[in-house]
Image (spheres, rainbow, N blue to C red):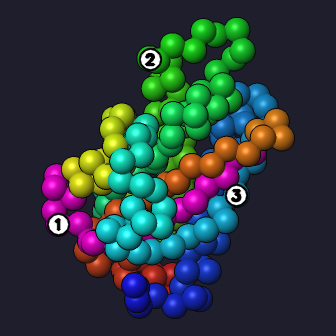
Amino acid sequence: MDNHFTDIQLDVLKELINIGGGHAATSISQLIDKPVNMLVPMIEIMDYQELYAKIMAEDQLVYAVMSQIYGDAGGVFLFALSDDSTEAMTDMMMPESVVKTEVLKESATKELVNIMVNSFLNATSKVLDVNLVSSVPLLTIDMFGAVISSLYMAFDQYDEQVMIIKNEFFYLGDKMEASLYFIPKAGVLEKLFKSIGV
């Protein structure tokens, strides 16, 4: 798909996301008092229908956390994790002595997403001098295709393009992969690039 965005635009955007990722890793490290690193090796903008072929199967069961974005660049952040990745993230977020119940797993996942999304938004807000705020994260456990489809049915004013931000967390030498999706309102990405000046 021709997303009509240039390599320079995506490179600048990736740098913004990396800044936000660094802030997120620092915040998580301070919270759990252990070193956490986060890299963003891939950013791609594509039609949401391509997700199932290129990123994640439609019938993949995921822990999906949604955070709605308000302000100068509206949309939805969606953080999707497999069950194994959710277990690993919970182990990272919670002390070893704590029994990992399903309720705690869901709570830890939502808190992780809350930290990540707000770190991204704070970094972007400072660099671009825009106002961005997020809603309280909501978690659902469902097939990936059903999650994406429900977002588009609930927010049909949103653009058909999705920004995929591939995250890699490194904790105690282990890598945990997850994907953060930004589903923007129509025209938001163009407005964002105009603010950046590229």
What is the distance, in whole Å, between disc 2 and disc 3 at their CAs?
28 Å
Q: Which residue occupies 42% across, 46% down?
A: 60
Q: Is residue 87 left or right of residue 194?
A: right
- Tell me the distance, in whole angstroms, between the alpha carbons under discs 1 and 2: 33 Å
Which badge, 2 or 3, is on the more N-terminal residue?
Answer: 3
Marks 1, 2: nearer the viewer: 2
- Image coordinates of residue 14 in percent, x first then y, are 60, 72
Q: In the image, what residue type sits under mark 2?
A: Val
Q: Are marks 1 and 2 in contact (CB under 8 Å)?
A: no
- Residue type at mark 3 is Leu
Residue named by callout 2: 103
Rendered position, 43 above or below 135 = below
Q: Residue 197 lies in magenta, yes or no?
A: no
Q: Secondary structure at mark 1?
A: loop
Residue 51, placed above or below residue 36 = below
Question: What's the CA distance linking mark 3 and mark 1?
Answer: 31 Å
Q: Percent from the top left, x then y, of residue 28? A: 66, 37
Q: Which residues are magenta?
A: 151-170
Foreground residue, 151 or 189? 151
Counting residues from the start of the chain, the first of labels 3 and 1 encountered is: 3
- Indicate the secondary structure of the residue bearing disc 3: strand
- In-front residue for pair 29/109: 109
Any magenta on residue 165? yes
Please give the label number shown on residue 157. 1
Asked whether the residues under the numbered discs 2 and 3 touch, taking CB atoms below 8 Å apart as contact, a structural biologist would say: no
Confirm whether residue 74 shows in the render: yes
Towards the viewer: 67 or 90:
90
| Residue 72 in view in this figure | no
SS label for mark 2: helix
The tag on residue 68 is: none
Q: Amino acid at mark 1?
A: Gln
At horizontal 51% and vertical 81% (from top left) the residue drawn is 196
